[in-house]
Every structure is written in C-alpha cells, then in structure tokens.
Image (cartoon, helix red, strand yellow):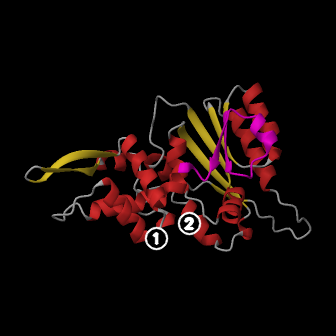
Amino acid sequence: MPKASKRTGLFYSFKNIFSKKKELPMGIAFIDYEHWYIALEKMYGRKPDIHMWLREVQKKCDLKEVIFFANFSKFRDKEKEIKRIRTVTNSIIDTYNPDAHYKKDFTDFIILDNIYQKALSREDINTFIIFTGDGHFSSVCAFLKNFCHKEVGIYGVQGGISSTLIKNVSWVREIPLEFELNAPYYNMLFTYLKNIKEQRDIYPTFRKTAETVASMHDVEFDTIKQLLSELINDGYITQLTKNIRRHEQIRILEPNWTLIEKDGLWLKTSIFNN
C-alpha cells in the first residue's frame, strides 16, 4: 500500500488520498468503526485494512469526506487505532459518554444525526456510503434513497448485516472483500516473482511457481494454483515462451508490474503481512 503522505494541514487527506474523479458521483462515507473492528476481529480474527477499503470505495464515487465514529473506550489499543485512522482522515468522532449516570451507547444516534445533517446540507452529494450492519440505520437509508433520491451503499462485516438494512439500500458490499482475503497469497506470489527476477537460470513456470510458493509458506498448492490462474486470466501475469536451450522451450511467467502497482495488488505493507 502507498505510504501516507506528510500532513500539510487539517484536510491533507482529501488532497492526497481522495483523488479527483470527475466521472464518478460525489460521495460521503460514515464509518461505524465499532462494527467494523469488533465484528471483524470476533468473526474473522482480522483487523480492518482501512486503505484497502478506501481504494475499493474510490472506484464507486469521488469521495469528498469520510467520518469515523466509535466509542474508543471499548478498544484495547485506543491510541493505535486512532493513529491508523488518521492516516486517512482527521474526521474522527469519539462517542464515549463520560457521564456515569448514562450507560447507553450513543454511537448509533450520533452517526444518524450526522447523516441527516449531511443529507439536508449537502445537496451536491449523490452517494451516501455507510459502514454498519445495524438495522437501526434502515430508516435513514430509506429516507436517503426514496425521499432524497440518493444512491445508498452499505459496507458491513459478512454475517453481521441486518436483513432489514439490506432491503432499504442501493447496494451492499461485505467485508472481508474477496480481494482482502486473497491479499496474503498475492503478496507471497509477487514477492517470489520479484525476488527471482534478477537471478539467472531460474525460470518461473506456472507449476514451479505454484509449488515453490506453496511449499515456502506452507499453504495449499491448489489455492496458489487457482489464484495464479486468476491472475493470468485477469492480465496481471502473462505466460511467455522462452528458449532456454537449443530446440527446448518453456512457458514462463511475466508479471505486469505497472498494472499490479496501479491496481494496488501487491500490498507489501498490508496489515496481513505484519
């Protein structure tokens, strides 16, 4: 993943990360980080990969603002998580209520209030993206979609999204994304292919690459074989014929590094590689 650029001001994120895409509708995102972090860790043993999610969203809209909400008192590593979020945006709302007389979690209410405010004040926003699985957001999604005529997209942790919520939105994307699940295997393959690029007399054929990567990382051969086939079919890797000796030819793998980098497929700094 690309490294976060050095901050130059409060809105550095929008200048450096939210690249202008005139052909896409303007959008805004509201993130229930408690749902994302807690449900993903509990159900899949993973932590959110915020930058990977951001790249996915940027394909759908010209993202003008993203706001994270959470009662951060629930997080074991509060400061660490806030620091990770700040590599994307400074718009973070801590919903912790210090009043000992009120134990209720106000996160949902605060998010809802912010959504309604934006719906009424930002007519230029065409796409509302909400990261949650809570059915309490069904009414606001129906309001945005049916009354305001906005596109409403939901991101939520797979297995933790309310069926009522799904019925009231334009589209739903479940986390972990298929790409997110495959990211560690992509890293294994591309790291191997990159490392042997300058070595003589080592030719990365399809089978040899799959066997070597599977053995090096103790993963299933069929898993690596399938993903390698998909990378070839999608144009990220080409099979070229090479003459190695007189009258002897083999088919070797040639990654399209420009396309791989452009699409962020080799996530060398992904949290899954740490």
Q: Quadrant of the N terminus?
A: bottom left
The residue that appears at 76% across and 26% down in the rendered structure is: 146
Name the secondary structure under disc 1.
Answer: loop
Left or right, 260 with respect to 33, comes to left
* Mark 2 or mark 1, whichever is nearer to me: 1
Relative vertical location of residue 94 with respect to residue 239 in this rendering, above or below: below
Give the CA separation, mark 2 to mark 1: 33 Å
Which stretch did the figure color magenta? 152-178
Viewer-side residue, 52 vs 227: 227
Instruction: Name the residue beneath numbered marker 1.
Output: 218
The answer to whether residue 3 is visible is no
x then y, percent, for residue 100 = 88, 71
Picture quadrant where residue 95 is located: bottom right
Residue at 79% across, 42% down: 163
Q: Which residue is mark 2?
A: 83
Local crowd at mark 1 within 10 Å, few (<14), some, or many (≥20)? few
**Does residue 62 lie above or below 196 as drawn?**
above
At numbered mark 2, what does the secondary structure look like: helix, strand or loop? helix
| Residue 43: % across, % down | 70, 62
Please name whichever residue, 50 or 238, is drawn nearer the observer in this view of the structure: 238
